[in-house]
Amino acid sequence: MIIEDEEAKANAAAFSAFFDSEFPGQLRRAAMLLRDRDAAHDVVHDALLQVWQRWGDLADPGPYLNRCVLNGCRDHASSRRRRRTLGAEVMAESTHPAGFAELHDVLLRLPFNQRAAVVLKFYGGLSTDEIAASLDCPIGSVGPWIQRAKRHLLKELT
């Protein structure tokens, strides 16, 4: 494909850099939410396609990508197509400490919004405002979701 327009070349280069920086983290988060690396790959790919389609209109594509990935995960998780096991390759690739598998199993039993809030805060490093924007919810919902999730995790892991 030959891109003749300089602005189009610049947009393509900027998106390529954005893709390279965002894809690995988004894939890990989606895999943790969905328990399925292949489905996570599809969700993240579709989300990045949505970002590309709106690339020229987005001042900050990061939050939009987060929302697209989370919505894709939510849609996939609610569909009958989902699988019930986490791909072994996700766990094999991880460099997580001992006990991560047990934590991950308990985390997967949380309701989606609680699980997403915990993953985005502690694994993704997002602020409460960023989590609320990503989940398209009031900021006041994020704290209680995280607190309920922490109580549940503490109860299950001790």
Image (spheres, rainbow, N blue to C red):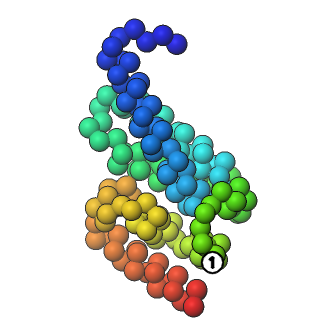
Residue drawn at point x = 53 percent, y = 48 percent? 24
Residue placed under numbered mark 1 in the picture: 99
Give above or below for 17 relative to 65. above
Return the x and y of residue 15 as percentages of the image width and height: 41, 31
Residue 55 quadrant: top left
Q: Residue at x 60, y 43 (%)?
A: 42
| Front-most of residues 71 and 16 | 16
122 relative to 57 in the view: left or right? right
Image quarter in which the C terminus is found: bottom right
Amino acid marked by disc 1: Gly
Numbered marks: total: 1
74 displayed left or right of 148: right
Secondary structure under the numbered disc 1 in the rendered image: loop
Other-residue count near label 1 (Cα within 10 Å), few / some / many at <14 / 14–19 / ≥20: few
Residue 103, quarter of picture = bottom right
Q: Where's residue 38, x and y in %?
A: 66, 48
Q: Nearer the viewer, residue 77 or 15?
A: 15
Can residue 29 be seen here? yes
Q: Can residue 80 be seen in this view?
A: no
Q: Residue at x 45, y 31 (%)?
A: 16
Residue at 49% from the left image edge and 51% from the top image edge: 25
Q: Where is residue 136 in the image (x, y as percent from the top left)?
A: 35, 56
Picture coordinates of residue 2 (x, y %)?
48, 10
